[in-house]
Amino acid sequence: MRTYFQRALREPLLLTGALWMLTLLAPFAPGLPTTSGLPWRQELVLAFLLIPTLALCARHVWQRGKTFRFNAQRDELFIALPLFLFIVWSAASMLWAASVFPALHHTLVWGAYLIFFLLMRRVAGNGRLLRFSITGLGIVILILSFACAVEFWGAPNDIPIRAGTLFRYFNGFGEMMAVAVPLFAALALRLRARRAAIFCGATAVLAWLAMFQALERAPIIGASVALLFLAGSSLFVRRFRPRSLVRALVLLAAFGAATALLVVPSPLTEGRVLAATRLHSTSAAEANTRVRFLFWGIGLEMWREHPLTGVGANNYDAAYPEARAEFSVKHADSALIAMDEEMLVERAHNEYVQILAELGAIGFVLFMVFCVGLTIAAWRALRYARSPLALGAVGSLISFALSSGASSASFRWMGGGLIFFFAAALISRFSAKRPQAEKKTFNLAPAFARTATISALLFALLMFGSKGMQATSVFLQGKLASAQTAEEVDRIFNQALVWNPSDAGLHFNYGIWLSQEKRAREAIAHLRYSVERGFNASICYAYLAAAEAEAGDLQSAERTLAHAARVYPRSIFLRVRHASALAEVGRKGEANAEYSAALVLNPRVARGWRQLICFGRKAAGTAAFRDKSIAMPGELYPENCIFAILDGNANRMPVATIEEKQNPEASERQNTEYRSQKSE
């Protein structure tokens, strides 16, 4: 260990070059509390590694002074410069973003990507450090793949896996595996050393297996295309042909066996949802596909409203309600607008649409210039390089680019992004036809060199401090489960807010707790903060309106529900709840019109919601039992809104409708029951 640190003092790149892959393990470390909101684990670990690396680099620059020379390849500058401008634009978007902290988070992540790319570009030029990086990455991929297999097959069926999964169901893990597969597959085909080839082949196959177990379809499609590209290049380009035909056939058989293990019915797949089933069900009519069309359309609506600047980096969720309302007006006949009212929507499930929506045409053009520069470098690497790393790195970029077209992770989940930029650094390294002749050497002034390295160090410190505060807040929230008294819960919430006052999820949870403690006036500010910054499912509006009504501000409750009904015009629940709010403020005609609109959507469900909202669970169940034209409480949708009503939003003002006026006795009986419940 002492020798390692002594070498690191002489060679700062050793720290990040040999340890960066540990960042990929951070999200799966046991004992860390999990909460909703922006990710922080990988960001914190990467910043922790960058700080000493950049500090030692700054020390070297400071000591060498006028003798310092900076060598930069042309393709490296074509990649790094637009990336730097993209980061500057992301930072500028904090000026107009509705939610500032997510925009800062986006800027920090992309800034870390740029620094990581520049460091890895120099690691790629050092054979010993490059071997350290690839070996360490392979070991980490193997660890995660084994852990995923244990989780998949360690339970008797899929139910317990769904309840406490670490690796499955759309968390970015599958995309990370997909990016790693072609890189190690290319090495397995071409490496001279047999043991190294076996290690890389096992890594590629197990990563492929874990990718299928993760059940993310976009990464599977991306990795499959990348492997086809790898196979085609190996057949038609002499420089990339396998070391031997036997090796290629063995690797192909291993991939086939791993695929069959999760596709062919057997005791190993019984009782489990399989990726093959999900792939087979993919179509334009499938719900998961259609809801992506909705998210993409809403993202394009954001861009139309803010064509140059966008809505602000990482602000898709904050801008979602208004954009969805506009989309619903323009596509009033579309079945898409009835979808997904019960879910929190963080991302567009398409990185390209999301960048366009959040950073506008300016940010999107900068991003595309970066992509073009990287594509040119990849083409040059394929033309001139002989190393299998060049072919594998291009395959990794293909896999990532395709997966990002239908994934919510992409660059937003740092694990996949780091492997992407590691592959980009390899491509930049191998893109020159004649490495020495193609380099452009820049002699930086000592002041400029010192400023650049110190600025990068300060950036890493800012990222570490920001993510450290976020982590402290999350750890404090983890103590809520063991809190014994209301005073202790209140104290923990406030301490967590001190460390991260911008956490919309924390504000929402605190607001719900305050409402349950009959402190509605205090809850309103926290619930409104969260609703305006991404917590805008129908249940979130319902909780805010309930707190406003409980505090006696019926007008604000009605305005909240009116806005919610505009965002989700096909929501029967919100229509009925808004009708009740209109009735409570004395606007009976509008209440009847709103309830009539709910009846048009689905009369049976609308009557069921009216019974539950206005008369409570017991009366709703009794009415539904007697009258089959009224839905039972358990049949209502969204299900989470049922719990919002039962938590304290019941017994609102009943709505008199045209239908009920034809049966005045039933209407009067229900109103009498309502008044008796209110008096209780």
Image: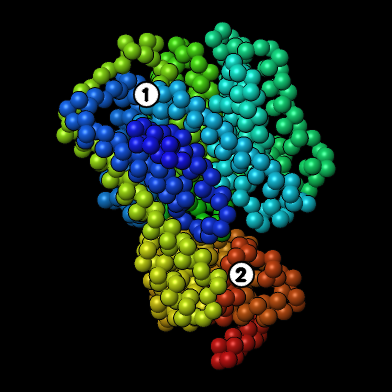
Is 188 above or below relative to 52? above
Badge 2 marks a residue whose secondary structure is helix
Three-letter code, disc 2: Ile
Q: Residue at x 61, y 80 (%)?
A: 615
Q: Residue at x 53, y 40 (%)?
A: 407
Report crowding for label 1: few under 14, some 14 to 19, many 20 or more residues within 10 A (C-alpha). Answer: many
Is 633 left or right of 447, judged from the image as shown?
right
Give the residue number, with chain letter if any, for mark 2: 642
Is 221 left or right of 426, judged from the image as shown?
right
Give the residue number, with chain letter if any, for mark 1: 373
Is 436 left or right of 21, judged from the image as shown?
left
Badge 1 marks a residue whose secondary structure is helix
Q: Residue at x 71, y 37 (%)?
A: 276
Residue 235 x, y percent position in the rendering: 61, 11
**172, 527: nearer the viewer:** 172
Report crowding for label 2: few under 14, some 14 to 19, many 20 or more residues within 10 A (C-alpha). Answer: many
Give the number of callouts.
2
Q: How is the image coloured?
A: rainbow
**272, 346: nearer the viewer:** 272
